[in-house]
Image: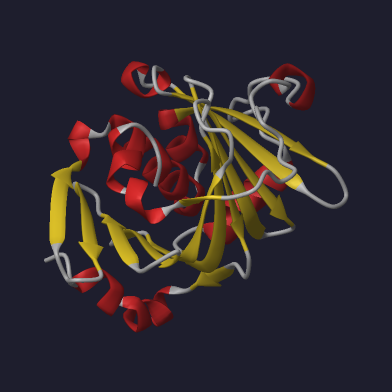
Amino acid sequence: MWFVMFWLLMASSVVAAAPSPMVSMPCADWNTRFQERLTQTTAPETLVHLLASHQGLGFATPFAEEKRIAVLRHPLQSSGQLIFLPTRGLYRQLQKPFMQELLITHDAIHQRNADDGTTALALDKLPAAQVFVGAFLALFAGSWDALHTHFEVYFTQDQQQWQLGLKPINEAMARLISCLVLEGEQERLVALWVQETNGDVTYDRFLDPRLVPETQWADYQAQFDWAR
């Protein structure tokens, strides 16, 4: 949920806030943070296990987001809930500063406002949005091939945390997005950074991340069915 036209869809959903501590350019220290680009044969066991542990699962969490835009003095902030189901796509409900829903399926982006007004835009017209969906699909597909098809892959870890660095391979996406960094603790995905080529940075914190097995997907169908 973020870049160029994609962010224009959501421009009314964020508010300016006082500055807060935040790494402004997550791609800036890339070569220091990540030692080398991974291949399937060099993928560490921790990453292999991480992918396997997410295979075929959904993801649900409240989130808090901060976006820094180069031309604005203060960051924009919003919060709500995020639900990802591999077969349905990504649902994002903004709850503050006011209600708004966004649904990214495999072929379109749907938006619904508090007055039930809805709009839709084909996903192929927003290649940068495909990067975001692709990151989730790749992680939760549980396979190296899914990651490697869309991204250059980098990985680092310490005793407390891991970081999965992704750089888009697709030329159109790479013109808009410099990098994505997913952060986690053990098997929990706790944050996502997105840096655009224009210097704008989006930081999402996942406040209570939960993996959702297929047996529970029906509990979330209502959040996806309104866009039909």
Q: With respect to residue 143, does 85 lie above or below?
A: below
Q: Position of residue 77 (x, y in %)?
A: 53, 52
Image side of residue 224 versus residue 128, left or right: left
Q: With respect to residue 140, does 42 lie above or below?
A: above
Residue at the image position 67 percent from the left and 47 percent from the top: 183
Q: Position of residue 90 (x, y in %)?
A: 35, 58
Q: Identify the residue at the far right of this view.
A: 159
Q: Position of residue 30 (x, y in %)?
A: 69, 22
In the image, 222 versus 76, the foreground residue is: 76
Image side of residue 111 versus residue 11, left or right: left
Q: Quadrant of residue 188?
A: bottom right
Residue at the image position 50 percent from the left and 45 percent from the top: 143
Q: Position of residue 11 (x, y in %)?
A: 35, 46
Colour treatment of the image: secondary structure
In the image, 3 versus 228, the foreground residue is: 3
Q: With respect to residue 54, does 76 lie above or below?
A: above
Residue at the image position 79 percent from the left and 20 percent from the top: 32
Q: Identify the residue at the far left of this view.
A: 228
Image side of residue 10 versus residue 44, left or right: left
Q: Quadrant of residue 157?
A: top right
Q: Quadrant of residue 129?
A: top left
Q: What is the total number of numbered labels drawn onto the structure image?
A: 0
Point out the image quarter for the C terminus.
bottom left
